[in-house]
Amino acid sequence: MLRSATSPGSFWTLFRLEAALTSLALLVLTALPGCSGGEAAPRPTLELTEADLAAVTAEDLNADAATQKADGKLQLEKTNLKLGFIKLTDCAPLVIAKEKGFFADEGLSVEVVAQPNWKTLLDNVISGDLDGAHMLSGQPLAATIGFGTQAHVITPFTMDLNGNGITVSNAIWEQMQSNDPALKSPTPPHPITADSLKPIVQNMLDTGSKLQMGMVFPTSTHNYELRYWLAAAGIHPGMYTESDIGGRTDAEVELSVTPPPMMPATLEAGNIQGYCVGEPWNQQAVAKGIGVPVCTNYDIWKNNPEKVFGMTREWADANPQTSIAVVKALIRAGKWLDETNADGKLVNREEAARILSGDNYVGADFDVLKNSMTGYFFFQKSDKREMPEFNVFFNHHCTYPWYSDGIWFLTQMRRWGQITEPQPEEWYHETARNVYQPEIYLAAAKLLLEEGLIEESDVPWKTDGYKPPTSEFIDGVTYDGRDPIGYINAHDIGNKDK
Amino acid sequence: MAYLEFDHVSFGFGNGHDKYPVLADANLAVEENEFVAIIGYSGSGKSTVMSLLAGLLHPDRGTVRLHGDQIGPPGPDRGIVFQNYSLLPWLTVHGNIELAVRQVFPQYSTEQREDWIQHYVDLVSLTGSEQKKPNELSGGMRQRLSLARTLSMQPEVLLLDEPLSALDAITRATLQDEITRLWSQDKRTVVMNTNDVDEALLMADRIVPLTPGPAATFGPSFPVPLPRPRNRATLNFDPEFKRLRNEVTQYMLSLHESHEDEQSTGVSLPDVQPISLDKAPSIQVHVA
Amino acid sequence: MEQLKYSLLKAINVSGLTFLEPVVRLCYGEEPREQLRKIGRFILIPAATFGLFLWAWAAIAPVYKTKSGEVPTPSVVYSAAQGIQDFHNRESDKEAAYTLTAEDRQAALAKTEADLDVVKDLREQANHQVNQAQAAKATWLEEELGPINEQYAALKEQFATDQKRREAALRNKAAGISQTDLTGKNELLAYIRGHQLKTEEEAATLAELEEERALLAEQTYPELSEALRWQTELAEREQYLQKKQEILSRSNRELKLAEQNEKLQTLKREYAAASGPQMLTLAEQMLQQEERISSIAASEYAKPWTLPMQIVRSVACVFAGFFLATAIAVPIGILCGVSTTFMAAVTPFIALFKPVSPIVWLPISLIIVGGVITDPDDHWLITTLAELPLIGWLQINPAFIASAITVALCSLWPTLVNTALGVASIDKDHLNVARVLRLSFFQRLTKIVIPSALPLIFAGLRISLGVGWMVLIAAELLSSSEGIGKFVWDMFNNGSSATFAQMFVVVFVVGAIGLLLDRIMIVFQRLVSFDGAPAAI
């Protein structure tokens, strides 16, 4: 009986090395559900037929050129976008623009993708994996001037005002209360300054230790706000230097980077005694009973700019019309979020909180998100206050990319040594103009106005990009974006320039 | 000039001081179509002789010749059947033979090759077990497969390195007959290692003893003029056979004793000496 | 029949699912007592242990509470898994809604609107129920807290008067001590200390009561939590239906196409009517409009990644890394086994790189991939992969590739070492066979060396795949490459009350897939192994 070795009698002898590997490959392939990638439709060829000519009406013949151009639709360079965000309530404009169909109205198909941390988010935007993202105000500036990852990142849209808080551990809170008896009340007077914290810091320094506090990113608003709050009470939060990129030189309180979701757990573990972070992580501390929010950034600087929408210069140049379309949708989302009824009550915030509580968005419990989003803030379980402007998404012309906002962050970078060399005043203005792009914003706003989706008064059409000087800071120092050097020199602690 | 010869061959393992001399000045001549059995104690270097013949090892001094030419690297012309079969366990019976046939006769068409393989499968009575793997075969079947693989290469010289020592007595007897039958059908030169005097007498034309190592060498040949075919049943009563057996055994025992004397270094052993060619106890003399 | 039985038994043996063996044998009526005993031991006992584990878990979980949350019970974990599945289903549903056309779309819209009405009614009820439950809880709290509050107030008042009395007494005492009265002064000190101790004691008593009050206030009121859960569930359902309605009535592909086609027709008519330089602008607009229509026609609903999709992507990623590791490790391993010189040359690298953690490899591979693929949208590799039929939807991007490379770098070592060992420990006799047959180097490799080393290579591959699977989760987490790791990080970042339960779901999913991968490798390992093959390490 003759048998060929290549047609074995037993199934099991089939398997040689090659066979084993091919089978593995097949297994993978068959495991994937049948789903085809978006194949580009063949490009049709447009032709005019006799029928088209015959269909011409008298109306068409009389139409003037203006009406023919009236369809203001943008010619999008790219319709499928991937935008990144960090799980914080202030990503709301992005999520709302998607969920309420504002992106779809612009003909955009947008995927919003949660990012693990600010660094990865920025890297993904720079690498082109993301088309744009929810960013810390300092990020586009820092990237553009080359602090951290160097890349020309721009922002045509400010996403919100305020929204952060400083929380301290229960133990520190008790000590602060004993230092300042006024704090002992269940509803202590606000704003709470770091004055009552100073003796604690001094005490710890005397015993050879330093108070540790967390913030979320070196160029985040939280870092600057926490530093501002501490320095306003004469506590030195440490300088960044060429060799100390951790920013702890001369520090009386040491600040370290902790990702927002880790804040409550890190506080509870005792690695830090306080932190500055966005929502819902201050409210979580109250809900879990592990800390007390003492100060919101509304108290540190009333209506301070918080997050921006960032993208690379390169991307914006390659997709100018798409950039405008994205900003259009974002402006509408901001307006929707800040819509109020006749009593001045925010009407859409509860729905927004419901949407944000989705697992693929912010994902925190609805009850927790609802507090700050609907204008309340728990400082303690017994201390619920109304804070209608805790998150501002549209009012005060906040979505406009103000040069003066960018310059404030640059002054803070210089004040704390992230910008190591003194820079001339013109540099501040120029850098802000490089990063903040009101042109895109205004182009988007103009189209929205034409479409009747916003009102004339919603946009500061005639501004030069600088907000009027303000002294609504916790220490009362006046900030004028036109005079950055003067502002840097107005503070006791930090770098001073000539 | 002999067909296959060992000319003053010396061989040792290791280097320099650690060198362990296995063979020293060994001489052997095998004629064409002769069946030579090399008999010796285990560890005396029988397998080394085989490896030298196959070309798997090279002599330190002296030459191994075939047709008067020094032998080259191993090749299918000197087919060796290894002591422990050396079958490839991941291949079937068919596959093991096929590997050899494909290599030696690359010019064969598929059909020719298959016929050739089947011929050798049938020859060693493995018909029906073609698709079995070696681990599904008994010891005897494995040795037959090993034999078939070697024979399928059509070697000029067949080298059998203790082909039957790992088998039980009955299988061993069957295979002895089988190998003898194959040899008689297809006469070719055979060199076989064994430690069994009866086996050597039954199968070989000539018995060549190997003195115990180290530095072993070949002793005087004992021709076996018994007529073929040899019947193991009647052989036992053959006076010539008895004489030869006695002679060879006596010679081997004397070798053993002298060797022991050389080896003894003051340790007095009991007077009772086990008679043995292999691992101590008894000399293997089978009465079928 | 017998034939089938042996096939079954052989399959069971090869797949390593030996616990099924007694079941098959029992079906064929072979030694029923013995088989039943085996079934008891290998099926019932493990099942019972698992049951016991679930029971213990359900019993212990509610007891263990931390400030970060409660340990979820099995049922909570199960409902979290259902929630994940719901999310997936709803998103798939929305995806389908995007591409529905004509009557199908109308029908779906009508149904969605009907569902929405029902949900809205239910929500009214739910709100009502929540209000009732809240009121009930308030009354209950009132009842419970009332006596405690009274006690607290009474004690507080009493302590205050006591303190005042003691302070007055101390003042009197102080007044009666002259400047030189040392004993008197020391006595006063002792009194004051006593007073302070007493005051502290009283404060502690009050604090205890306060704690009791706080505990009561925090206690969950089952009816309320039940009502709230229902309310939340309905709210989520409503939101989903609203979005679906929005898609079906506004952003559906067919609708968008119709709208744009309408515009194109207008443009066409205008172009046909136009003459002179006007035609240029119109023609341009028309062509742009056409392009826009074709891009809409090809568009898909931007579906978020859901866990089932992420699982498939993770498995794809682990296999990508695993094949890469195999492609690197097996040839190098063979060279190591064949040549001691080569082995000596690469040993320092193996020793140096083997212990490096995935967390270190990942940023490095991210940088390398980022350097090679500077513009993911335009890179040929990414665009080619995106167009492949089965792989396209995985959206292979630099993060995926970097994760796969990380998996490969971490998991290639067991295969490499095992291959080298397998090749080096090849039976000398097999090599002698190769010499006698005068096999060429390549033939020796394919006919003797590799088959002989295969069992050990596969043992290594099995370990590699296991390591790769573990590494992958970490790599995805760090690179934010969509997959199980990203899911874990996202859910962790949510910090919601469901987070813990979702983590437990992931534990089971990851474990089950890891088990499955291991089983698959065992089957392969058994298929290539032969008697007397060198044992796995």
Image: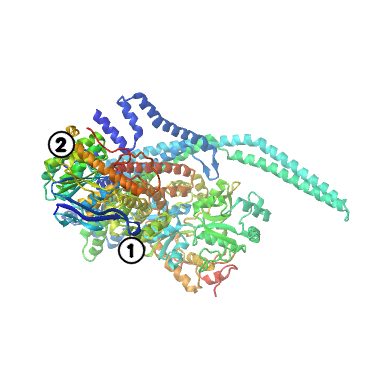
Graded by Cα atoms within 10 Å as few (under 14), some (14 to 19) or many (20 or more), the crowding at tag 2 reads some
The structure residue drawn at horizontal position 77% and vertical position 43%, both measured from the top left corner, is C161
Total numbered labels placed on residues in the image: 2
The structure residue drawn at horizontal position 47% and vertical position 52%, both measured from the top left corner, is A88
Q: Which residue is mark 2?
A: B230
Q: Residue B184 at x, y = what percent?
A: 13, 41
Amino acid at circle 1: Ala
Placement of B266 over or under A222, stated as above or below:
above
Whether residue A122 is visible: yes
Q: Which residue is mark 1?
A: A318
Whether residue A474 is visible: no
Query: Which tag is nearer the camera, tag 1 or tag 2?
Result: 2
Placement of C280 over or under C505, stated as above or below:
below
Kind of element beneath mark 1: helix
Graded by Cα atoms within 10 Å as few (under 14), some (14 to 19) or many (20 or more), the crowding at tag 1 reads few
Instruction: Tell which residue pokes out farthest to the bottom in this image.
Output: A498
Q: Chain of mark 2?
A: B
Q: Nearer the viewer, residue A165 or B195?
A: B195
Kind of element beneath mark 2: loop
- Residue B84 position by quadrant: top left
Are circles 1 and 2 on residues that touch, CB within 8 Å? Answer: no
Q: Would residue C251 appear left or right of B125 to someone viewing this image?
A: right
Q: Would residue A168 appear left or right of B57 to someone viewing this image?
A: right
Q: Residue A377 at x, y = what percent?
A: 55, 50
- Residue A455 position by quadrant: bottom left
Placement of A233 over or under B250, stated as above or below:
below
Say which quadrant the N terminus of chain B sits in.
bottom left
